[in-house]
Image (spheres, helix red, strand yellow):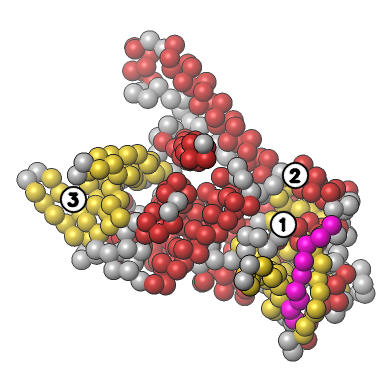
Amino acid sequence: MDESLKKIESGDRTVWITQPNEIENILDRQKTAFNIAKEKLASEPGKIETAMQVSEAFGRGLFEDFIKKNSDEWTMEKWVKPIVGNIFNPMGTTATFTKISEDEAKSLIFRCHLHEDSKEPHIASLFTYGFLRGMLLSAFPDGEILMGSSMAQGAPMIEFTYKKNATDEDKLERERIKEVFMNNTKKAEE
Amino acid sequence: MINDEFISTGIDKLDILLEGGILQGFTTLIFGSPGSSIEILSKQLSTTGSVLYFTTEETKDEVVKTMTRFGWNPENIDFVDIASKYSQNILTREKKRESIYEQRSKLKIKELIELGSSGMAPSVREEEDFLAILSNKIRVSSFEKIIINSLDFFLSRYSQEEVLRTLHAAKVNNIEKKGLLFIIMTRGIHGDIFERRMEGIADCIIELEVIQKGSTFERFLAVKKMRNYAKKIGIARYMIDSDGLVLEMIERIM
């Protein structure tokens, strides 16, 4: 790992933390795509699928422009490094990777501009899941991202698990996320 | 047809802006943003000639319903309803998921161990290759117009390289068959490099833009590129009424 991801070892535990270094160009690009996904949701109520597709396409575009050149044969470690250096850090995302192995990684997201600036955390979560998924599947077509919650420093966090090879059950995660989003939106409206 | 070389878009004033329509064999890239009513434009383009229409966000029924509301006849259109196919895939997977859980709840521990810890069926991944459907249908068909609405769907599932390869093949087929190929995509999602590459493939580029002026929105249709026909480049303000997209105040740039 290079300086874009700082390794910290404590006892028998190792974590890797991102080094945010915001770059306006990529933040603007993210903001534009997020607004498009948001407007698609607004103009076609209930069509969460379209908004998910927009965010996945955005992730695939980021992969082509910033990640692809780094490897022909992907391992999770080879994927995480440019994701952090070229995407997370320029987007000002503060995350801690609690696991990076050959075929699986886990990260806790502590700070994300979209969640803070948009004031629409549900849409921001859907969008973030979608674009991370687009980037992951570009390298690992049989992979999947699982989105869960976890506690860190007493506060609830979003935990992403990036899998190189998804099980059949993992493959249902995308639809589950859409369902969760739909339920959260309904609750917010009530 | 307006003359031997040009094909009418199906929108009179757009044909005027384009000085007679679009040249046979041309690939037209249409950029839009949410709120620009690009979905109405794509249907309006289908009102004349024989049309092959790929619909990814709306089902065929939804497209037909909207066209009927505007008084446009959809009978000349051969639909490839990817939106329905895709929704059906999701429903099938969901049913499988339910049936797997039902079966699993009836299994004994010994049987579960034999199946593996999750007790899931061997695979729930089968999905149609939508890019192959697109490619194959374009290759074997012969229509005056082919409309892909929209490319965003394919770009959310396939790499940009794969999509570009398919579009190159579609373009070659379209040149041979002397039709019009319209590709619709949203600007701002797929990255500048990809947009530039798409602009390179296209013979004609049309962009729908929405500009907020105070509390109102103004919509503009700009013809930004027309290979070998620079005089056709221009811009027009448009509005949406019961006739669909109506162009007004045409202004030529060159």
> Disc 2: which chain?
B
> Disc 1: which chain?
B
Image coords of residue B81 (percent x, y): 72, 45
Q: Give amino acid for label 3.
A: Val
- Residue drawn at x 68%, y 63% as measured from the top left: B36
SS for callout 1: helix
Q: Are marks 3 and 2 on the same chain?
A: no
Part of the protein shown in magenta: B234-242
Q: Which residue is mark 3?
A: A15
B195 w.r.t. B131: above or below: below
Which mark is drawn over residue A66? none
In front: B66, or B176? B66
Q: Are marks 3 and 1 on the same chain?
A: no
Q: Which residue is mark 2?
A: B62
- Residue drawn at x 40%, y 59% as measured from the top left: A117
* Quadrant position of residue A36: bottom right
Q: Give amino acid for label 2.
A: Glu
B187 w.r.t. A8: above or below: below
Q: Which residue is mark 1?
A: B39
| Alpha carbon distance from label 3 to label 2 | 50 Å
